Image (cartoon, rainbow, N blue to C red):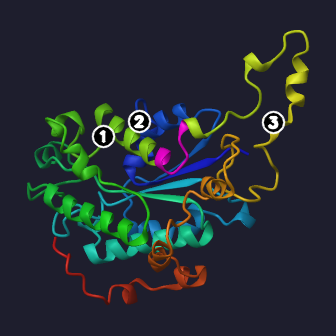
Amino acid sequence: MRPKVVLFGDSITEESFGDGGWGASLADLLRRKADMVLRGYSGYNTRWALKVMERVFPAAGDGGAYPSAVTVFFGANDACLPERCSGFQHVPLLEYKQNLRLIVSFLKNRWPRTVIILITPPPIDEEARLRYPYIENTIGLPERTNEAAGTYAKACVAVANECQIPAIDLWSKMQQIPNWQTECLWDGLHLSRVGNKVVFEEVTNTLKGEGIGAEDLVVDLPLIEDVDPKKPLTAFDDQDHNAVVTSSGPKTSPILGLKETKPTPAAHSCRLSPMAPKTEDKNRAASDCTVKSKETSNVTLANSFAVQDPDYAV
């Protein structure tokens, strides 16, 4: 079967399949090479995401195929200020970090070799948030601030570093663009075409760095130019075209559909295991974000928040 990339997040992910959206652009880039699976939930924070993990990511025995990569894109709602009109979406910074760890742990435990990419919340244009309120705002103050979003973005990157997985610091990257408030955002929070392009390029580059770029994947089944006009059906007898299609799933790697190469055994192993640690130290560090599935599902958030976080400040 084709490789699968799951996009997991809030409204910025849910809307990514719209016209000019980063998810739609990614699906177009990898058409006939990988399937994009949209799992975006408008308004969700990491606390709510943890409640639905089993339903969003069913186990293999329940029909859940091994994804090649998963993007985890939360934080914009967690960073809502608790005393403002969207306070019910707020998640304290310490809890946000622990929730990200638990999400990563869940995915690593279920699919150890899946590439997990954390994406930070985008920057916030506070003036635009006042012009585009989603619920009644009686106090006349923005429900989000760019400062708070930056704090959560920093926490997201820190968790990614701790878990030895890639991170996209969208909050920082977008603010490098002149007039980012109007160029990258249309309502002070959600992405414009330019903003979607930024995410698309960052995700594409990150996937490429993990060996899941467009040039690393092969199209499934014969191309029209491979079909002999005189004997068209012979094209479908070519075993090479069927090599990436299996009914039982990956035998040695979740990254199905990679181009055939003849590397050295070590290089071949790296190709098939994009998440394989480069050193023993990395493996030990990454293990901090991997726990048994039973522990992941049963862990209580109350216990998880007992550790004091020096970065907590909202």
Which label's residue is closer to the chain start, 2 or 3? 2
**Number of marks drawn:** 3
Which label's residue is closer to the chain start, 1 or 3? 1
The picture quadrant where one finds residue 292 is bottom right
Spatial CA distance of label 2 from label 3 is 33 Å
| Residue 232, disc | none
Q: On the image, numbered disc 1 is attached to which residue?
A: 191
Q: Which residues are magenta?
A: 207-214
| Residue 21, disc | 2
Spatial CA distance of label 2 from label 1 is 8 Å
Which of the two marks, 1 or 3, is nearer to us in this view? 3
Amino acid type at mark 3: Asp
Q: Is residue 209 magenta?
A: yes
Looking at the rendered structure, the secondary structure element under dot 2 is loop
Amino acid type at mark 1: Leu
Residue for point 58% across, 68% down: 54
Looking at the rendered structure, the secondary structure element under dot 3 is helix
Q: Is residue 225 magenta?
A: no
Horizontal side, residue 313 vs residue 255: left or right: left
| Residue 137 percent across, percent down from the top left | 15, 55
Q: On the image, numbered disc 3 is attached to which residue?
A: 240
Badge 2 vs badge 1, beta-carbon distance below 8 Å: yes
| Residue 106 percent across, percent down from the top left | 54, 72
Amino acid type at mark 2: Gly
> Callout 3: 10 Å neighbours few (<14), some, many (20+)?
few
Horizontal side, residue 289 vs residue 262: left or right: left
Horizontal side, residue 259 vs residue 233: left or right: left
Residue for point 13% across, 47% down: 130
The residue furthest front is 264
